[in-house]
Image (cartoon, rainbow, N blue to C red):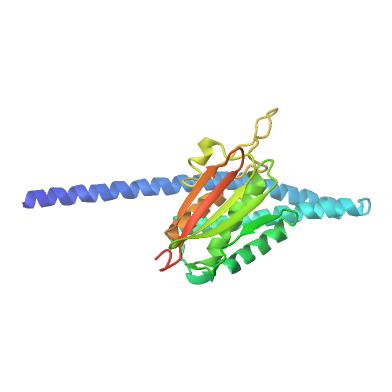
């Protein structure tokens, strides 16, 4: 019995060390992916901001008002995109380090969506979002700041990657003890090879080689950080996340959250 106990203890220790080593390797891989992708993604908008601001400073006397407005609009859009990326990066580091602490409060679904749409409207004033809410009052125990980030990331994903998109819709519905949030668009959809790993890893897109056309599924060559963050936040709330392509075109992102208890506890 003593020998069996010693052997069992030794094997358990070896298994734990092996699992810890695997986690360390995976963490280093994610960090390497982040560093490689971020170095590219940040460089592109920063170059644009620097070029536009230099033009405004050096050539202000010869630029038309319309051209100045165009340059300033580009600077604002790139700055907003960088701000969103930084927010996602902070969330990723907290997730990987186990420091994503949820601040759970009872949150009105209607108020939550009002805040989300107000923020989205400031960034994309010309894009209408069709919203459908339950007739009854619905409150959910969530971290409202993080859930706002999830919905805004999905909307941002549609704006940047759903080529050919004209409409975006958000449908919130109550299913027994759960609330469903579904965001749909009528864009180009997601290639199957990307869809299968969209929530499980950080996806880095590559710039096309010289002479190649830009892929139809993206306006920016970013790393897919937003969807990775969304999945982690919903998992922290003990929720469920789904993504599927729609027919004849478009995409649906859906997540479910509990209406009772403390999500994430």
Query: In the rendered view, does 243 fall on the left or right side of 212?
Result: left
Q: Which residue appears farthest toward the left when viewing the image?
A: 1
Q: Which residue appears farthest toward the top when viewing the image?
A: 211
Q: Which residue appears farthest toward the right when viewing the image?
A: 62
Foreground of the two, 238 or 63: 238
Count up the numbered dots.
Answer: 0
Q: Say above or below: 145 vs 61.
A: below
The answer to whether residue 42 shows anywhere in this view is no
Residue 251: percent from left, percent from top: 58, 44
Q: Say above or below: 188 vs 69.
A: above
Residue 240: percent from left, percent from top: 45, 54
Q: In percent of the image, x 28 and y 49: which residue is there? A: 17
Q: Which residue appears farthest toward the front when viewing the image?
A: 135
The answer to whether residue 116 shows anywhere in this view is yes
Query: In the rendered view, does 21 fall on the left or right side of 131?
Result: left
Foreground of the two, 256 or 42: 256
Q: In percent of the image, x 49 and y 72: which residue is there? A: 105
Q: In percent of the image, x 63 and y 58: which residue is there? A: 131
Q: In percent of the image, x 53 and y 47: which residue is there? A: 34
Residue 197: percent from left, percent from top: 48, 42
Query: In the rendered view, does 161 fall on the left or right side of 104?
Result: right
Foreground of the two, 67 or 233: 233
Q: Say above or below: 189 vs 136.
A: above
* Picture quarter with the C terminus: bottom left
Name which quarter of the figure residue 189 lies in: top right
Residue 53: percent from left, percent from top: 80, 53
């Amino acid at each position: 019995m003593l020998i069996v106990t010693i052997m069992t203890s030794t094997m358990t220790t070896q298994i734990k060390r092996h699992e810890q080593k695997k986690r360390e390797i995976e963490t280093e891989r994610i960090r390497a992916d982040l560093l490689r992708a971020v170095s590219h993604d940040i460089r592109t908008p920063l170059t644009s901001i620097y070029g536009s601001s230099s033009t405004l400073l050096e050539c202000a006397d010869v630029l038309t008002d319309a051209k100045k407005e165009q340059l300033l609009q580009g600077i604002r859009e790139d700055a907003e995109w960088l701000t969103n990326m930084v927010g996602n990066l902070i969330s990723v580091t907290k997730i990987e380090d186990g420091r994503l602490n949820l601040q759970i409060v009872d949150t009105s679904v209607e108020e939550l969506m009002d805040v989300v749409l107000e923020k989205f409207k400031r960034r994309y004033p010309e894009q209408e979002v069709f919203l459908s809410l339950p007739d009854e009052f619905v409150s959910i125990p969530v971290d409202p700041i993080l859930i706002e980030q999830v919905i805004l990331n999905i909307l941002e994903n549609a704006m940047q990657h759903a080529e050919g998109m004209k409409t975006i819709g958000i449908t919130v519905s109550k299913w027994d003890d759960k609330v469903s949030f579904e965001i749909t668009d009528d864009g180009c959809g997601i290639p199957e090879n990307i869809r299968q790993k969209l929530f499980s890893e950080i996806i880095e897109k590559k710039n096309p080689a010289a002479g190649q056309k830009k892929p139809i599924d993206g306006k920016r060559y970013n790393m897919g950080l937003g969807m990775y963050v969304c999945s982690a936040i919903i998992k922290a709330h003990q929720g469920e996340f789904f993504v599927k392509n729609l027919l004849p075109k478009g995409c649906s992102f859906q997540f479910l959250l509990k209406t009772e208890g403390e999500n994430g506890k």
